[in-house]
Amino acid sequence: MANTEYIGVKDIVDPFVLVENVNGVGYGELVHVRDSKGKLRFGQVKMLSEKATLVQVFTGTEDLVPSTTKIRFLGRPLEVKLSKNMLGRTFNGLGEPRDGCGETYGGKRVNINGLPLNPMARQYPKDFISTGISAIDTLTTLIRGQKLPIFSGNGLPHNQLAIQIATQAKIMGSDDFAVVFAGIGIKHDDAAFFTQELSRKGHSNNIVTFLNLADDPVIERIATPRMALSTAEYLAYELGLHVLVIITDMTSYCEALREIGVAAGEVPSRKGYPAYLYSDLASLYERAGVVRGVSGSVTQIPILTMPNDDITHPIPDLTGFITEGQIVLSRELDSKNIYPPIDILTSLSRLMKDGIGKGYTREDHPSVSSQLFASYSKVQDVRSLASVVGEDELSKNDKMSLEFGRLFEEKFLKQGKEEEREIGYSLDMAWEILSTLPRSELTRVSLDDIREHIKTSGN
Amino acid sequence: MEAKTNFAPNNKEGIVTLVNGPVIKASNMRNFAMREVVKVGPKKLMGEIIRMDGDDATIQVYEDTDGLKIFETVTGTGEALSIEVGPGLIGSFFDGIGRPLDSLLESEGMYISPGTSVNMLNRDKAWEVTPVAKPGDLATGGTVIATVQETPLLLHRIMAPPEMEGEITWVAPGGFHKGSEIVAKIKDAFGREITIPMIQRWPVRTPRPYRERLLPTEPLVTGQRVIDGLFPIAKGGTACIPGGFGTGKTVTQHQLAKWGDAQVVIYIGCGERGNEMTDVLEQFPVLEDPRSGRPLMERTILIANTSNMPVAAREASIYTGITIAEYFRDMGYDVAIMADSTSRWAEALRELSGRLEEIPAEEGFPAYLPSRLAEFYERAGRVVTLNGENGSVSVIGAVSPPGGDFTEPVTRHTKRFIRCFWGLDKNLANARHYPAISWIDSYSEYAEEVNGWFCSNVDSRWGSTREKVRQILAEDNKVQQVIKLVGEDVLPDDQRLIAFTAFLIKNGYLQQNSFGSDSYSPPSKGFMILDVIIDFYEKALNLVRKGIPISLIKEDESVDAITHMRELAADDTEGFALVRKRINAHLERVAAERTRKLGGE
Ligand SMILES: Nc1ncnc2c1ncn2[C@@H]1O[C@H](COP(=O)(O)OP(=O)(O)OP(=O)(O)O)[C@@H](O)[C@H]1O
Ligand SMILES: [Mg+2]
């Protein structure tokens, strides 16, 4: 039972071992696996039957010898030890300190899987977070308690953008904030960039970091985001902090899941990913929000790199089906040297509808943002027409549209890596560039808005 | 009276032999019934037997199985998966297996933990019962025994359960009675006494019977112009909304739940976001029903198995919802049910099927996917109830195709069983043209059937106007292909007029923001807008034929105003008349100048 040690396993299929004749073990239980030298690895019960128990070994099964491997079932699930002392510390993917500062003292242990939040306990998130980035504040507004991922590609400045959001977000204005950073399968350099930037901006004492680097065991990646989210929930719902969780790279997480699924011989779904990828991702992304009667909140910004920049790939696709919008980075804008290279048309913030407008940001915000989307979408059509017939052959209105597109990208989208813009400033700039368009094109803003914000006749 | 079951009594015990996530196996199960609901392990997790194999049973467990052990016990309940029906349903919020989330919140706190059992309906709450039947009356299935004004919007009719017949011997007197009480006693043909409780049970996988099926004739008015005007759904009809992520399935479903003219609305959040349910929960009690002025929550029932809740209960949530819908239909009401998203339900089937190691058909989905979909949509319909009244269940299912590709199995099979298709277009959504319902891919087979209703209730030209609009949009579709290649300026003016009129229809009529004063647009408002546009088109076409350049026709503030008509209130007939007057004045001026010039030449 909880303390019996079993010596010898029947089969090993990385990352699983099959143990026979086991009694009294619970599904999902945590397991200690020791190799012949006595070195400890963790594992988890993945399937139970009368004859055998399947254990998934974190850190993998390399070097395990069937006859000498020792297995101990701990009678409890995989847990993380939570306390205030975690702030400022760095842990590995399984929650063990990796900063050489020793164990964190005290605290309580919780199951890293968490439990589903009762939808009745939630409060609909409505608080606008100013990030100082025009494209985000105006067009894909971030709301406190939202899960808003960044869909990126290799080589695009997603880390830079995440840092800019994290450090400029007004969520961090006071001392009741914290950042939980989970690095999954990322490069040493990227991890160092995050910690350096955050401490350079004076946040090193309110970050908790969980790192599973590219050369760390793949299977630990399953646990890493769960460790991070359990910590975030603790900081938010028990200590009352507003927590921003940055998880990168979700693509490495999903690949780890696929690897395990294949090893377990499961029937795969699209592109070899397991059929339960949606449910599994949801069990992570849904751990964000605002709870009624609790002062803290959990805001999630997961980052994923789209394989081949393909937004229909299962990882971004299923993510988009779960999260409350997405910020999509564009290689084309990046190559035009526009930072942040946000492709606003495919980006979306689903929660902005209730967090902007009168009493939140500014009354004209909803309609002016809708107009920017409509007009910029037309720019794309005109550009493709121009590539066929040539710019000179375009009609007057189409030429105006192209000019609008240029202004939008160069003035509105483009901004400095440390430049902070007020929402009012961004909205005024939006009107300014919209006023270069003919009035008949401004169908999304009301006639009253046009009268108020467009002084000169656009016609 | 309990719904009929013929399962063995509850004195049997199986033992767990395998645990694989939500699917477990148990032995010593010979005395259990197929599809019987069981309680598993010390936490008494709820499960359902889905396969019998000699002494062994395969069970799908509706709650998280973490911690479950081999050799733990399985006990029976003697009943198939059932829910409670009766007063107290309206305004409630249940999980996929019918547990009220408010009670769970009270007893468990903010998280939902496995193994919690609570009654679906409150037995202690007293309702003011008004008897309708009296001793000596004959009661058959569906006979209304008594009524309860459950909310100001809904009169709850307590009915004799289906498949019973006898003479009423006793009826509860008028006044307050608790949910746990019985409302009548009946003596059947064999002289046995049967009691009719206020709260009854029904197995969710069994459709409730009705007398006869009718063809739909009336529209389910949704207040969404693109739907009511172009692709209407009938009361008792079926529709699906497929679309990639973020294209507007949920917002559309919420719109229908808010503004649809059904008497009871059931909203199922199936494998979707928790916040979306919270949104409904916060809004509906304060939003007013446009017809009665009462809070919408007084006719709404919510069911949620959010994406982070156990997957087996996702499979059940759809049945829980449709069973409640049928129950209210049986009272003679028009019920609308929204399921967001049926793809998550299909994926739950796939996941369970995978764990059962069934041989997959397309893309891992089990071979029985189409038949399950058909069974679900076939529970919609307009019927004559057992009690001889008309009632209907309209079903609107969201479909979430991977990668937004409509050729995938769930979309493809769903299309076979629905009659109204609202396809969401990624490009429209990207341009924030909402609702992003494609006017090219969508269709409604009900348009003819409900035309009569619109003609007599809105305007006799409803059908002909719709035809003209569809023609213009279809022609525009062709014109746009050409524009993409050569630009607009080189087209002949009559084609440019088509493109321009289509622009007006798209921006002035089809587009409708759900989050402003235009959220609910009664059919009369939509008709006024279209009438102005079509009138403009016909007059402009005349001018174009006379050789007047289109630029003179369209470049005027009075014409720009067309795309802003939707900002007007529905009853602002003067506002609409003014727009029309100004356009006419403008067009007459253009024509007159032309004549003058020609005269002067
Ligand atoms: N009619 C509308 N009016 C205004 N905004 C809309 C409308 N329809 C959709 N939207 C916008 O589009 C966003 C996404 O819509 P919605 O959440 O309904 O997408 P969905 O198709 O349900 O996506 P998913 O499959 O990921 O759940 C909304 O948050 C809203 O901002
Ligand atoms: Mg949705």
Image: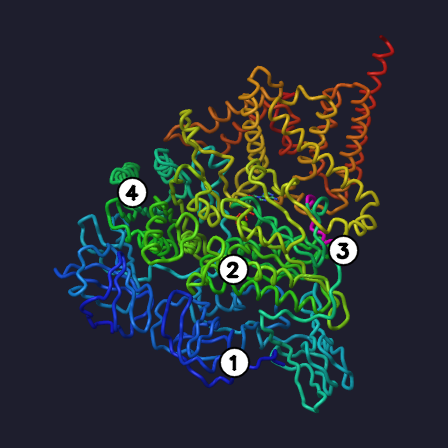
Q: Chain of mark 4?
A: A
Q: Look at the magenta stretch and give its main secondary structure.
A: loop
Question: Number of labelled discs?
Answer: 4
Q: Which residues are magenta?
A: B218-226
Quadrant of the image containing the C terminus of chain B: top right
Q: Amino acid at mark 2?
A: Ala
Name the element at disc 4.
strand
Question: A172 or B111: which is nearer to us?
Answer: B111
Q: Amino acid at mark 1?
A: Gly
The residue pinned by badge 3 equals: B218
Distance (Cα) linking label 4 and label 2: 40 Å
Above or below for B589 versus A161:
above
Q: Residue furthest bottom?
A: B191
Distance (Cα) linking label 3 and label 2: 36 Å
Q: Amino acid at mark 3?
A: Glu
The answer, for residue B180, to whether it is visible in the render is: yes
User: Does label 1 lie on the same chain as label 4?
Assistant: no
Q: Which mark is residue B367?
A: 2
Label 1, residues with CA under 10 Å away: few <14, some 14-19, many ≥20: many
Label located before the other in sequence (1 or 2): 1
Q: Which mark is residue A186?
A: 4
The residue pinned by badge 1 equals: B78
Horizontal side of residue B218 vs A405, given as left or right: right
Name the element at disc 3.
loop
Q: Residue at x 52, y 39 (%)?
A: A361
Q: Residue furthest right?
A: B599
Q: Amino acid at mark 4?
A: Ile
